[in-house]
Amino acid sequence: MEMESLRELYIEELKDLYSAENQIIKALPKMVKAATSSELKKGFEQHLAQTRGQVERLEKIFKELDESPKGKKCKGMEGLVEEDSELMKEDFEDALLDAALIGAAQRVEHYEIAAYGTVRAFAEELGESEHVSLLEETLEEEKKTDEKLTELAKQINAQANEESGEAEQRQTTQKKTKRAA
């Protein structure tokens, strides 16, 4: 599709975000199930509820634009979700898996922060003040989620480092025992 105006680009970017958010809604329950930290599980569950609200805001914008939100697949989010799926198939220990899940979730958040910042700027330029407010609300939620993930990561990364250090120590002891035998 050839873009001829900022409004057309704005609508296409909104469709991309709508697709991205719906992909996240499908991926988050798997992340909840995979997480071992109760705090991380709770954070993913809260973000799932929040994401549903973000989809509703996008639907409100589409209704005001008299446009359909469907018809576009967000390839960027598809790639991030695929990477996350592959990560969950790895044989990680508890905290190490949680650390990896946080990293995956933060990549998603940063993608969304960039995308929402862009469409908010488009809405501003197009004089869509109602849209700007809705998009700003979502953008702030995404930033807060990223901050919460960063805080959780400090604790979980330290735990993962400690657990992996203990595992390495066990492996070294086992190797020494085998050599001595």
Image: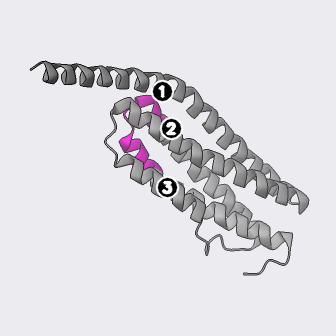
Q: Which residue is mark 2?
A: 102
Which residues are drawn in magenta? 28-42
Q: Amino acid at mark 2?
A: Ile
Q: Residues within 10 Å of mark 1 (few under 14, many from 20)?
A: some
Q: Amino acid at mark 3?
A: Val
Is 115 drawn above or below residue 174 in the view shown? below
Q: Is residue 179 left or right of residue 95?
A: left
**Distance from label 2 to label 1 (Cα)?**
9 Å
**Distance from label 3 to label 1 (Cα)?**
22 Å
Is residue 57 or residue 102 the one in the foreground?
102
Which callout, 2 or 1, points to the residue nearer the camera?
A: 1
Q: Is residue 27 left or right of residue 14?
A: left
Find residue 43 and report its horizontal and vertical position in percent: 50, 36
Secondary structure mainly formed by the magenta segment: helix
Is 76 drawn above or below residue 9 in the view shown? above
Magenta region includes residue 39: yes
Q: Are marks 2 and 1 in contact (CB under 8 Å)?
A: yes
Q: Which badge, 2 or 1, is on the more N-terminal residue?
A: 2
Q: Residue at x 67, y 67 (%)?
A: 15
Q: Residues within 10 Å of mark 3 (few under 14, many from 20)?
A: many
Q: Is residue 34 left or right of residue 79?
A: left
Is residue 99 or residue 59 the one in the foreground?
99
Find residue 147 and report its horizontal and vertical position in percent: 63, 32
